[in-house]
């Protein structure tokens, strides 16, 4: 056992006018669907729109109000839909526009809005704009993309390296010029210095908004203001002007939700993106808490061990920085990241306890919580034995590139097992029937073998499951404003194993305590908090309604105590 004594200072409830900025989505919870892996309705092994529609009652029961839908647009699927060939058509494997419109309407009947995943930094090389751009240097669409002449030696214009491996420049023999692609060679970057690109994209966004969607998740939005020749790819000088222009031309006219993916974001950047008076985005995804455990040189392919002190520091930094301006996105995982319980919890003996603890911690922070499909049942990372079983273009490309550089097969597989994107992309585990009830055919990627134990049907049948824990957290958010608007104040800040904080709103105080370890702990309660009592809103062991001089915490124990007035 570990003993620790911490301190607490007086909590603040000064909202500084924040209440006047309330939005309909502030108390909502977002559920991300990766369509290819969610539910297959026709037996082709690929999840589809009708499959999503068939699970809307499940999502309504969970209580969520927003679905972040990863791309379903027409695409050759070089990057699983993040390479769009037609922004206003639906990929055949997912369904049709009529089915998409039905999904929007049927979700809305259940008080669920659709957040479309929109990629405007780049398109597919099969997009009509790029097909036209290839025809000649004089084509009107040529300047929709970014072209450069070869360097003096005839090679690439500069040494920019694609995020998916290899050069970020691809040679077009017909014109003798290179085009920029920050990701796959089949994902040419759009030229956001061209006003015609602005007009095309804005008009397209408005047509989607007219269909009744709730807003957009903006993929790698921090890259659209790039300064190519200076190799400033993120946070370019024109970035925020471009987003403000987009806001005024499209979603800013209504009350849509917008979240920008910004791997480069600092707290100062986030205040620019999401500040109340900025007229840019509702919130951003930042990844400080994820990158904290990547190797400085090898990146995510060589993980650092989880270390709570630095994790707490990052979360506190963002909670504090966006306390009264801006808005935090809260997430542990998504389609690009490892499974939350595998990364931050325990996927073995304490999988259930740690998954509940992570859920409580996330939903009791200030900001908008995101649930990634399967997170609500504690799905885990997958360990395929061979590289051939993986489908992710990033993992496959970097595996080959790193092996050529001398990295061993074993080291790369270890990195892929820990952080590869396919961890999040294995099919949703609905029940213990073949292929986890995801498809009657052959799934596009192999189902995680543990689906017989970890699945929705089993979770629904177990009153104390992770799933019902999530449902309660979603409901509490709508019931208690302190969970939405309460100030965040860290307590027990120096404790090496416990992450705890207070939320305070007016006269309400909520104490949240999370044991981030598999150890039994004796936690000495600071003098000011001793004998605090109230209502235990949620816990993953026996409810606690009172604090003594010390308390015994179980492995991964977590609870939220609403302090009596």
Image (cartoon, helix red, strand yellow):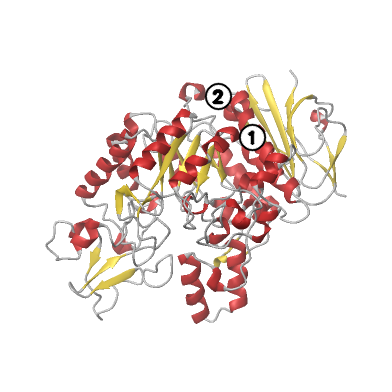
320 relative position to 99: left or right: right
Q: In this view, does 167 lie above or below 267?
A: below
Residue 205 percent coordinates (x, y): 30, 41
Q: Which of 454 and 334 is in front in this view?
A: 454
357 relative position to 183: left or right: right
User: Is residue 560 visible to the viewer in this orientation of the structure?
Assistant: no
Q: Earlier in the sequence, mark 2 or mark 1?
A: 2
Q: Residue at x 14, y 56 (%)?
A: 140
User: Is residue 230 visible to the viewer in this orientation of the structure?
Assistant: yes
- Give the image quarter of residue 234: bottom left
Residue 375 percent coordinates (x, y): 61, 47
- How dense is the environment of label 2, judged by Cα within 10 Å: few (below 14), some, or many (20 and up)? some
- Give the image quarter of residue 491: top right
Q: Mark 2 points at which residue?
A: 15
Q: Nearer the viewer, residue 405 or 188?
A: 188
Q: How far apart are marks 2 and 1 (CA)?
A: 28 Å
- Give the image quarter of residue 125: bottom left
Which quadrant holds the C terminus?
top right
Q: Nearer the viewer, mark 2 or mark 1?
A: 1
Label number found at residue 471: 1
Residue 529 percent coordinates (x, y): 79, 29
Residue 521 percent coordinates (x, y): 84, 46
Mark 1 residue element: helix
């Amino acid at each position: 056992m570990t003993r620790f004594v911490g301190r607490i200072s007086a909590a603040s409830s000064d909202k500084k006018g924040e209440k006047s900025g309330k939005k309909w989505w502030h108390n909502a919870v977002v559920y991300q669907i990766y369509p290819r892996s969610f539910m297959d309705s026709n037996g082709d092994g690929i999840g589809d729109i009708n499959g999503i529609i068939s699970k809307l009652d499940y999502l309504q029961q969970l209580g969520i109000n927003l679905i972040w839908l990863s791309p379903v647009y027409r695409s050759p699927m070089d990057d699983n839909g993040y390479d769009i060939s037609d922004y206003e058509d639906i990929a055949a494997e997912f369904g049709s526009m009529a089915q998409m419109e039905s999904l929007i309407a049927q979700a809305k009947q259940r008080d669920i809005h659709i957040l479309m995943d929109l990629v405007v930094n780049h398109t597919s090389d099969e997009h009509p704009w790029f097909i036209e751009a290839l025809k000649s240097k004089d084509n009107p669409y040529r300047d929709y993309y970014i072209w450069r002449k070869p360097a003096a030696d005839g090679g690439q214009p500069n040494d920019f390296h694609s995020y998916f491996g290899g050069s970020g420049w691809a040679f077009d023999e017909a014109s003798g010029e290179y085009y920029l692609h920050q990701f796959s060679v089949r994902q040419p970057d759009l030229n956001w210095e061209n006003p015609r690109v602005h007009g095309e994209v804005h008009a397209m966004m408005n047509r989607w908004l007219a269909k009744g969607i709730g807003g957009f998740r903006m993929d790698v939005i921090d890259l659209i203001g790039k300064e190519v020749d200076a190799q400033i790819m993120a946070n370019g000088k024109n970035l925020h002007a471009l987003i403000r222009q987009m806001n005024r031309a499209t979603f800013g006219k209504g009350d849509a939700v917008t979240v920008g993916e910004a791997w480069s974001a600092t707290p100062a950047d986030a205040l620019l993106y999401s500040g109340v008076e900025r007229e840019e985005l509702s919130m951003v995804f930042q990844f400080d808490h994820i990158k904290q455990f990547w190797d400085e040189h090898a990146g995510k392919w060589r993980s650092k061990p989880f270390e709570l002190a630095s994790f707490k520091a990052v979360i506190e930094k963002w909670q504090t920085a966006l306390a009264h301006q801006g808005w935090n996105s809260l997430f542990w995982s998504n389609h690009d990241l490892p499974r939350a319980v595998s990364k931050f919890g325990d996927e073995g003996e304490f999988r259930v306890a740690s998954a509940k603890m992570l859920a409580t911690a996330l939903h009791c922070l200030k900001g908008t919580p995101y649930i990634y499909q399967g997170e609500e049942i504690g799905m885990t990372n997958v360990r395929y034995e061979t590289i051939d079983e993986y489908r992710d273009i990033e993992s496959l490309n970097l595996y080959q590139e790193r092996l050529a550089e001398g990295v061993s097969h074993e080291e790369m597989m270890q990195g892929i097992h820990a952080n590869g994107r396919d961890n999040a992309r294995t099919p949703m585990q609905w029940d213990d029937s073949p292929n986890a009830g995801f498809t009657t055919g052959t799934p596009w990627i192999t189902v995680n073998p543990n689906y017989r134990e970890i699945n929705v049907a089993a979770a629904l049948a177990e009153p104390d499951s992770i799933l019902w824990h999530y449902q309660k957290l979603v409901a509490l958010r709508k019931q208690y404003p302190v969970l939405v608007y309460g100030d965040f104040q860290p307590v027990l800040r120096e404790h090496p194993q416990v992450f705890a904080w207070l939320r305070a709103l007016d006269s309400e105080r909520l104490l949240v305590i999370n044991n981030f370890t598999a150890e039994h702990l004796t936690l000495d309660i600071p003098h000011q908090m001793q004998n605090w009592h109230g209502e235990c809103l949620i816990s993953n062991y026996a409810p606690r309604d009172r604090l003594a001089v010390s308390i015994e915490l179980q492995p991964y124990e977590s609870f939220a105590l609403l302090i009596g007035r």
